[in-house]
Image (cartoon, rainbow, N blue to C red):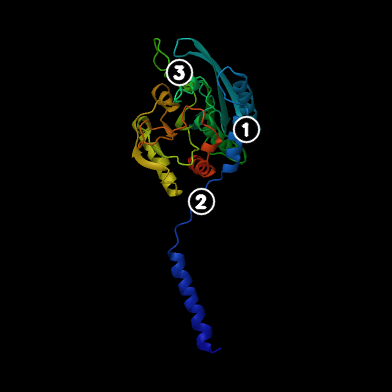
């Protein structure tokens, strides 16, 4: 080999490598999150059966959630209370709260929430006789809880947590007035657990301040789309934009779209309206179809077939990206 070949060729190779490297996308530091783990937590909830409030399945699931949070190092609080349902009958509520990091209130916390109960009626079923079945609740309930349990596990693995985090599993979210009810209806029949929590928080004078909150609801579907929910835009627009920018940077812009959805009554609404904490709803809502919600919503088909690990991974990473 000549001297020319031995010096020029390596030089050309280095130049090509430099040009090639220059075309690569910037490296994204992905937050630690396991969709396999989140999926397993959803399966475990489903094994209890529908988590209808005041049922044995609901109680067993609540005890398991408390045990899981404690195992991950959280200081766990069980908030008990009553709220009137659509008929005016008091419903027992058990909100489960896991505190991670400094609990003194010296530093504003981040609130992460999801509801763990399931709807007592499949009132979106086409056949009337099927409407009195319980909703299985794989996506509507278990998916948000599954993601937050994995978030909790990841927080438990950290040596330090700069920003304290509260993970709240809200109860009795999904007992709003069923379609087939024909009697006199109360207002605010949805999200009873978050109404109780927000009211208590407001009455305490915000002893523990929060920077902002994020509520997850129906976050596991293979075809999920998370638009800009309008209450979130109105009450917590800056944080909503922050979260959606993070999703875009992580490569999940196709899921977290910048389309504006209608306002949705979910747990975040009462956290915003009653507690005064800016809170963002991450919820599957497709503005392209008639109801906005998927075909399995509030039916017997809300099962594990509606859960995608890739969607769980996306939501989990986006949530984790908000925590220091």
How far apart in space, not on screen, are marks 1 and 3 (Cα)?
31 Å
SS class of the residue under badge 3?
helix
Which numbered dot is residue 299? none
- The quarter in which the N terminus is drawn is bottom right
For the residues bearing labels 1 and 3, Cβ distance under 8 angstroms: no
SS class of the residue under badge 1?
helix
The quarter holding residue 278 reads top left
Q: Is residue 165 visible?
A: no
SS class of the residue under badge 2?
loop
**How many residues crowd around disc 2 within 10 Å: few (fewer than 14), some, or many (20 or more)?**
few
Left or right: 141 with respect to 261? right
- Asked if residue 223 is positioned above or below residue 93 in the image, the reply reads below
For the residues bearing labels 3 and 2, Cβ distance under 8 angstroms: no
The mark that comes first in sequence, 2 or 1, is 2
For label 1, the residue is: 44
The mark that comes first in sequence, 1 or 3, is 1
Q: At 46% from the left edge and 14% from the top edge, which residue is drawn?
A: 85
Q: Position of residue 104 (x, y in %)?
A: 55, 28
Image mark count = 3
Q: Position of residue 304 (x, y in %)?
A: 55, 36
Foreground disc of the pair 1, 3 = 1
Which numbered dot is residue 29? 2
**How many residues crowd around disc 1 within 10 Å: few (fewer than 14), some, or many (20 or more)?**
some
The quarter holding residue 266 reads top left
Foreground disc of the pair 2, 1 = 1
Q: Position of residue 69 (x, y in %)?
A: 61, 31
Q: Position of residue 115 (x, y in %)?
A: 51, 27
- Asked if residue 253 is positioned above or below residue 96 in the image, the reply reads below
For label 3, the residue is: 199
Q: At 49% from the left edge and 44% from the top edge, which residue is drawn?
A: 314
Of 46 and 27, which appears nearest the observer? 46
């Amino acid at each position: 080999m000549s001297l020319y070949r031995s010096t020029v060729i390596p030089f050309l190779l280095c130049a090509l490598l430099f040009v090639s490297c220059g075309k690569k996308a910037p490296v994204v530091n992905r937050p630690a999150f396991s969709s396999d783990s989140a999926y397993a937590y959803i399966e475990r909830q489903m094994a209890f059966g529908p988590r209808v409030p005041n049922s044995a399945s609901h109680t067993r699931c609540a005890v398991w959630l408390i045990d899981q949070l404690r195992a991950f190092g959280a200081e766990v609080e069980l908030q008990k209370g009553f709220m009137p349902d659509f008929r005016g009958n008091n419903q027992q509520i058990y909100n489960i709260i896991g505190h991670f990091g400094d609990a003194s209130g010296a530093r504003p916390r981040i609130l992460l929430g999801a509801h763990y109960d399931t709807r007592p009626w499949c009132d979106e079923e086409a056949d009337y006789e099927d409407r009195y079945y319980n909703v299985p609740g794989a996506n509507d309930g278990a998916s948000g809880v599954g993601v937050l349990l994995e978030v909790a596990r990841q927080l438990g693995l950290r040596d330090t947590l700069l920003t304290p985090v509260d993970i709240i599993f809200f109860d009795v979210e999904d007992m709003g007035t069923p379609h087939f009810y024909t009697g006199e209806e109360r207002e605010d029949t949805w999200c009873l657990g978050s109404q109780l929590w927000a009211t208590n928080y407001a009455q305490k004078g915000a002893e523990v301040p929060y920077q902002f909150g994020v509520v997850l609801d129906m976050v596991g579907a293979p075809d999920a789309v998370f638009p800009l929910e309008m209450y979130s835009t109105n009450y917590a627009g800056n944080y909503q934009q922050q979260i959606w920018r993070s999703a875009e940077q992580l490569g999940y812009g196709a899921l977290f779209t910048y389309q504006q959805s209608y306002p949705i009554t979910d747990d975040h609404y009462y956290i915003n309206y009653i507690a005064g904490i800016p809170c963002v709803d991450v919820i599957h809502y497709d503005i392209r179809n008639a109801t906005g919600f998927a075909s399995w919503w509030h039916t017997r088909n809300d099962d594990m077939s509606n859960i995608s690990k890739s969607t769980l991974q996306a939501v989990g990473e986006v949530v984790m990206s908000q925590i220091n």
